[in-house]
Image: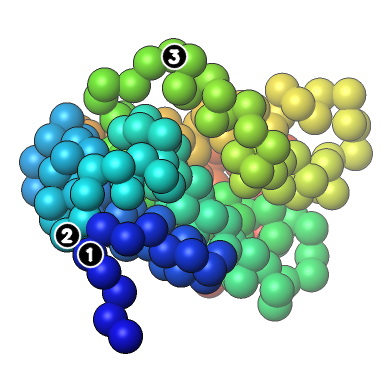
Amino acid sequence: MAKTAGRPPRSQSDIVEFRSKIAKHAVAIYRAEGFGAVSMRRLAKEVGCAPMTIYAHFEGKQDILRYLWADVLADMSDEIQEILKLIVAPDERLQTAAQTFVSYWIDHPDHFRLVFMSNDVTRSDVSTFVMDEETLAHFRVFSDLVQAVLQDHSNLKASTDTLISGMIGIAFCLNTIRDYPWADATMMTDRLLTSIIGPTKSIP
């Protein structure tokens, strides 16, 4: 029997599938018109259900945005973890993770703008998301990687935060100021790493 339009999914797999479907439509609207064009009513129309069905799965527009942020960060982290499976040396693991992080955001400028440059977002929305344990875990991986390389752990947090902010800065510049003749992103990331932890092995 076909599902009735607007009828809330019942099983857990149905709920996950429905939330994913809503997210895909939200991303499509965002890419075409910006996040300001995303609304619960429009999403309901796009999906073919009642607005209340959307509200049964998301508290509101900002909840959808947080879902999209989490999805993008998970995708980025999965890419890093997949590459690290084949690498053992601590310094090479850190460099590979850093290069992959920067490359991900440069290769996915829409994802970068969504996560780091969304409009109509309150400080409370950002704070709630950033302090979520799952969000922190995506960045904590760099703390573990830096710790494995540095001999002096007393400056671990400062070193890790400097690295993360520097990597985001590189991606930001290359995504938003494209006309400037920036140096190669790989070279800039290597220089950033060297300034924080000293020389590392080069990646072919």
Task: Give the vertical position of 29 relative to 66 (above or below).
Answer: below
Q: Residues within 10 Å of mark 1 (few under 14, many from 20)?
A: few
Residue topped by disc 1 = 5
Task: Give the vertical position of 71 relative to 129 (above or below).
Answer: below
Residue topped by disc 2 = 48
Distance between the Cα atoms at labels 3 and 2? 32 Å
Q: Residue at x 22, y 64 (%)?
A: 5
Q: Is residue 77 visible?
A: yes
Kind of residue sitting beneath label 1? Ala
Task: Give the vertical position of 148 relative to 34 (above or below).
Answer: below
Residue 91 occupies quadrant: bottom right
Proximity of marks 3 and 2: CB atoms separated by less than 8 Å:
no
Residue 159 occupies quadrant: top right
Q: Is residue 65 visible?
A: no
Q: Indicate which disc, 3 or 2, sits on the residue closer to the N terminus.
A: 2
Q: Residue at x 22, y 49 (%)?
A: 50
Q: Residues within 10 Å of mark 3 (few under 14, many from 20)?
A: few
**Closer to us: mark 2 or mark 1?**
1
Proximity of marks 2 and 1: CB atoms separated by less than 8 Å:
yes
